[in-house]
Image (cartoon, rainbow, N blue to C red):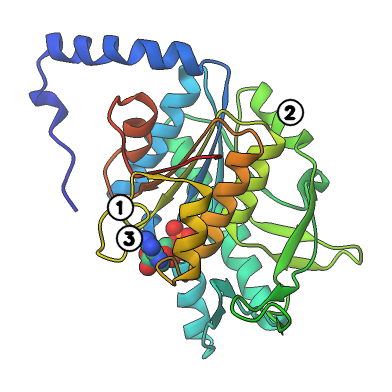
Amino acid sequence: MSTAPDITSVAPRDRAEILAQALPYIRRYHGKTMVIKYGGNAMTDPSLQQDFAEDVVLLKLVGINPVVVHGGGPQIETLLKRLGKKGEFIQGMRVTDAETMEVVEWVLAGEVQQDIVGLINQAGGKAVGLTGRDGAMIRARKLRMADQADPSREHDVGQVGDIVGIDPAVVKALQDDQFIPVVSPIGFGEQNESYNINADVVAAKLATVLQAEKLLMLTNIRGVLDKDMQLLTELTPRRIDELVADGTISGGMIPKIAGALDAAKSGVNAVHIIDGRVPHALLLEVLGNEPFGTMIRSH
Ligand code: ADP
Ligand code: MG
């Protein structure tokens, strides 16, 4: 991808002008919560990782409350491969047997979460890593997944979780202080068993229970594309139904769009799927005045 422009080449006068232009947005969003889904594929490039961490810290410093929910598909895939296991997906969900669940927990709550926490801290923030177990945040049960074409058929995807409820108390406590919560999408069941939950689904539900101002989903593509690979800048619930039904929306975009739509319908003011491969994608969306990616409408 393109590299960031050399900031030393921006004249101080222009820099001041740029900052001044961000003021209306900073005022509008001051004190508001933004849930950010940090996509697995968009978070493997070191320079983009650093941009992301800087953006999150900057939002926090201007009085916005960012809450990060991360995925980790590519990292899970890498470790599964090393263990001689092959990842399998049904309708965008990772089939999770007991061994895969262990790998998911190691990778997400260990490596990936702590990498993000470290990056944010290095950028000057105070990040705290959490899984859904912390503060008894994400209660889950086994997902019963109906077949898309034939809803009377059910797929067994193992320890994939369906969210029963989210208690956001721990997130609120952290963000009311100066901390930036970083959430791994792992839930717990009635027997204290672990569930692997799609990170988009967690981000969407968390945005809803927090009544976030924005839900931003960073991914590895420009946004939602139509059959001719053109970017769809706005989507209504009806259009989404059509695109899913005719197969234009498939794979990982299915849970993403479903979560996005749920959040939009449940009172999250602005829901956007944006290109995490663009340097400073987050700041561009929040403080820029050009539409970027796909906006999901509630009606
Ligand atoms: P993430 O890490 O962001 O969750 P996923 O791989 O789960 O990434 O989901 C994004 C992927 O969804 C895209 O890379 C693309 O391959 C796929 N996809 C399926 N249908 C569409 C569509 N209509 N528009 C854009 N991407 C789509
Ligand atoms: Mg995904």
Badges 1 and 2: C-beta atoms under 8 Å apart?
A: no
Question: Does ligand 1 reach within 8 Å of label 1's beta carbon?
Answer: yes
Q: How many marks?
A: 3
For image coordinates 30% across by 66% down, the residue present is 227
Nearer the camera: disc 3 or disc 1: 3
Badges 2 and 3: C-beta atoms under 8 Å apart?
A: no
Please give the residue where the numbered disc 2 appears in the rendered image.
Answer: 173
**For mark 3, does the 10 Å Cα neighbourhood hold few (<14), some (14 to 19), or many (20 or more) residues?**
few
Q: Quadrant of residue 226?
A: bottom left
Disc 2/disc 3 C-alpha distance (Å) = 41 Å
Side of 133 where 64 appears, left or right: left
Amino acid type, label 1: Arg
Residue with the most extreme bottom position: 84
Residue nearest the viewer, comparing 57 with 64: 64
| Quadrant assignment for the C terminus | top right
Q: Is residue 51 above or below residue 113?
A: above
Instruction: Indicate the secondary structure of the residue bearing disc 1.
Output: loop
For image coordinates 52% across by 64% down, the residue present is 254
Please give the residue where the numbered disc 1 appears in the rendered image.
Answer: 222
Can you give x and y, in whole percent of width and height, for residue 193 in the image? Answer: 83, 68
Which label belongs to residue 226? 3
